[in-house]
Image (cartoon, helix red, strand yellow):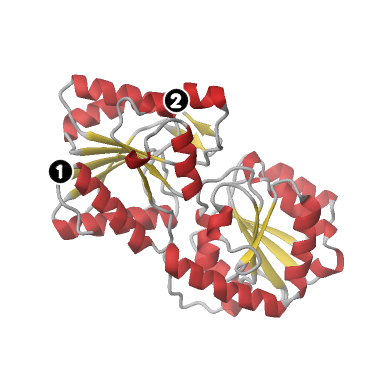
Amino acid sequence: MKVLFFCNLVPGKQGSFEDLLTALGWEFKRHGDELVLVLAGKPIPQVAESFLEAGLRWHVIPDWTADPDEVNPWAFFSPAVNLLVEEHPDVAVVHFGNELPSLAACILGRLKGVHAKWVWQQDQQMSDPGVLTAVASKIRLLSAAFDHFVAVYDGGKQSMVLRGIAEHRITVVNNSTMARSTNRTAEQVRNNLGVREKALIAVSVASLIPRKRLDFIIKAFADAGSASQNAILLVIGDGSERQSLQSLVSELKLEKAVKFLGLRNDVRDILAAGEMFVHSATAEACSYAILESMAAGIPALVTDSGAAREQISDGESGFVVERDDFETFTKLLQQLLSDADSRHKMGEAARARWHDRYRTEVSAKKYYDLYRSLAGGESEG
């Protein structure tokens, strides 16, 4: 079996999605099958090495994704058709948001004699549609040509059903992450980052773009008062809003309390050295950043978007707050910053929940079995 996997990813770090692709590559390799990636940029050497070890090949489509704010979906169309003819896969997988270029590539590929099974995989949050959206949905149009759909959380599946996709054509495979061992102690991480001794570390991992809403978190820290005086917020990520967020930090006089770290390849080490995770996006699917915090064994305070209420057991492994409820978010931030026992208990619960539900090996096996079934083979169950 050969699977051609289209994803507008630029693998600039060894993150959870790169880990999933690597694990999936090993699953294919174990069965003597082939997974070929089509990406929006070259993998960095560390990622490329792990891909090659797992038996993965890849192609790059230039100008597909300029940055997290700028995706050019139609840049995918013509190169995708050429690759379909060149690779002639048994299954073609699309893991990015724009449906129409995918539909066009599917149809033209079939006209050129490539009769692969097509799978569309959820990339971002899907809100429940209104009556008009349900009838005129792009994904409903896509279902006329695609064979199967993957939702990354139960709410995503329900949204697809409301858009007219038959339930038996949808498989739920949760996003996932893996635990990483490290030789660095929390003290070493702190020293490397210049974090003052005994400061309580809160971590946020997100692209610095509007829908991630880092200003919401920064303002909450400003309003947390005495509870945040011994805390430092480490912001991991980069994006178009970095300058404006840094200006906001200066305006609120939080220069000693907020540290922008940019893009990092040691996110797991930093999370393991932290005491809590904060996230305030207005739209998500099944957040990898939340999953990484769970695997690190720290509680999360997040706003309600996408799979947040599925990932986090509210009040047990963290807190989930209504999306625009700034007052409650700030109150719970104060509570977590002030209560070490609660942080510890919730962190243990978060780690256990990750282990039971969101490990990379489990998701990779589910994806492989789905592709194999569509290609005409029998899955191992």
Asked whether residue 48 appears in the rendered view, the answer is no
Q: Is mark 1 on a helix, strand or loop?
A: loop
Query: Can you tell which quarter of the image residue 19 is in?
Result: bottom left
- Give the residue at x 20% y 33%: 116
Looking at the image, residue 95 lies above or below residue 20: above
- Which residue, given by chain and number where applicable, does mark 1 sit on? 376
Residue 95 at x, y percent in the picture = 38, 40
- The mark tally for this picture is 2
Amino acid type shown at disc 2:
Lys
Q: Is mark 2 on a helix, strand or loop?
A: helix
- Give the residue at x 74% y 49%: 216
- Which residue, given by chain and number where applicable, does mark 2 sit on? 138
Residue 221 at x, y percent in the picture = 78, 59
Amino acid type shown at disc 1:
Gly
Q: Which of 273 and 146 is in front in this view?
A: 146
For mark 1, does the 10 Å Cα neighbourhood hold few (<14), some (14 to 19), or many (20 or more) residues? few
Looking at the image, residue 284 lies above or below residue 269: above
Query: Can you tell which quarter of the image residue 273 is in?
Result: bottom right
Name which of mark 1 and mark 2 comes first in the sequence: 2
For mark 2, does the 10 Å Cα neighbourhood hold few (<14), some (14 to 19), or many (20 or more) residues? some
Quarter in which the C terminus is drawn = bottom left
Q: Which of 66 and 87 is in front in this view?
A: 87
379 sits to left or right of 179 = left
Residue 66 at x, y percent in the picture = 49, 34
- Give the residue at x 40% y 64%: 359
Looking at the image, residue 359 lies above or below residue 281: below
361 sits to left or right of 213 = left
Q: Nearer the viewer, residue 226 or 266?
A: 226
159 sits to left or right of 280 = left
Looking at the image, residue 206 lies above or below residue 113: below
Query: Can you tell which quarter of the image residue 256 is in?
Result: bottom right
